[in-house]
Image (spheres, rainbow, N blue to C red):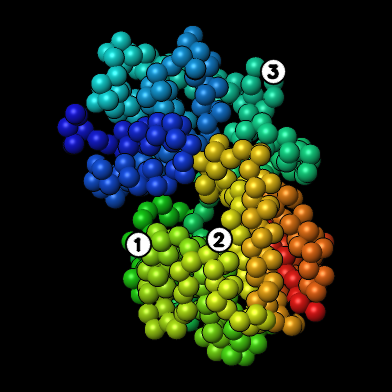
Amino acid sequence: MPKQQSRTARYTAIETLCNLYRSQSPVKPLFDRVVQKYSLPTNERSLAMQMVYGVLRHRQFLDRILELLSRTPLRKVDPFVHQALAVGLYQLFFLHRIPESAAVNEVVESCKVAKVPQRLHGFVNGILRQAIRQKKTLAVQAQTDNSGRPILNHPDWLIQRWQQNFGSAETDRICRANNSEPTLVLRVNSARITREDFCRILDAAGITSQPGRYSPEAVSLPEFHGSITSLPGYDEGFFQVQDEAAQLATTLLGPFFPAGEYLDGCAGLGGKTSHLLQLAKLHDLRITAVEPEPQRLKKLQDNIARLFPDSRLIIHEGTLQQFSTLCAADFFHGILIDAPCSGTGVTGRHPDIRWNRRPEELMRYQLEQIHLLSLAATLVRQKGVLVYATCSLEPEENQQVVHEFLRIHPDFALTDCSPYLPESARQFIENDFFIPHPSATIDGFFAARMQRT
């Protein structure tokens, strides 16, 4: 086995990418396992993650450069060498702060550590050196494929369905937004600190921050690329990582009934649950969260303990179906269903999604989403509110789900989201739905607000 100290950010990135293409699993757990295996220091971890996610965002562009430089078809290139070249090219074309010689040498060294045949060391070195010499020309040539079509770094099936649903111009804009590195967005825990005071703390630490454009509790950190836990105020529970679209979803449960009962039916890691707890402080609400998956449940509990150590949150470990058999009907004033989905609205923040998803999965998600809404419907009291949300752009998971739910449950009616959103966010309203598309300032999202009549 290679020596432990030989593992670098580049090696970690290459191994993670190899594991991803073998397994088609979510990239974050794969990355975390590799980092833990090699005890990578924080600065190396951040660089490795940037390279992994960068390669995934620009996969087709990088492969196109390889096609232009190599006589060997990509399908015949050794898998480790393929990903090593992708990591090397990503550094050369996108990470301009890294010296070109360091980018090349470290990637070649990673091949040696992995015991790649020696003849391939020269192949890797030669391709990368050639890329340096031809960088300007390649940067232009690799914008299109052999047939002259633009390289959008998304699978054909997704591009084609977006072109059909949104048109070519909007599809190009969405893809280019997804290919940019997203800005870190935080939700300030207003139950503990004001946004202004938190920004002052960040400024004192030398961290550039900007107030959010749409959510009154949002702060963006356009220049920050470090560890979340290293940010000032993390241990004190001053903030939660959460995009502005997701922050606005919980506000759609308003107007809140004083001392009302509210449920997060798909709590996950607790982003929206913790936001409900912020609102609970203002309106004396009682919040319940449901989460069946043990690992997510543990992270939910840790998150809530950090943000609200004195919380009275009620947590049910189990499925929403199990919970619905234990809970009285017509109990909740409001329920949020942030349903499992394809995630095609967040392929900029999670670029592995675009390569792992398949079109046939959409109908499977739709069936689950309708089932979850139907379970929640039995728990909403008269005049109560049911909010349905996804981070998908696909009509099969969004409008079609809502229309089918309303057909099955005529005692619910769709209501306009506009009155419950800040004015700056109302630009994203379409036929009463909240539907922002991905951009530099917000993730792709969908939300519908329904009320029981």
SS at mark 3 in the image: loop
Seen from the viewer's position, the closer of residues 261 and 237 is: 261
Residue 154: image location, x then y, percent: 61, 35
Say whether residue 426 is left or right of residue 71.
Answer: right
For marks 3 and 1, the one nearer the N-term is 3
Q: Residues within 10 Å of mark 1 (few under 14, many from 20)?
A: few
Q: CA distance from mark 2 to mark 3?
A: 37 Å
For marks 2 and 3, the one nearer the N-term is 3
Residue at the (40%, 70%) spot, across then down: 301
**13 w.r.t. 292: above or below:** above
Q: Which mark is residue 243?
A: 2
Residue at numbered disc 1: 229
Say whether residue 94 is left or right of residue 4.
Answer: right
Q: Amino acid at mark 1?
A: Thr
Say whether residue 322 is left or right of residue 158.
Answer: left
Q: Amino acid at mark 2?
A: Asp
Q: CA distance from mark 3 to mark 1?
A: 46 Å
Residue at numbered disc 3: 147
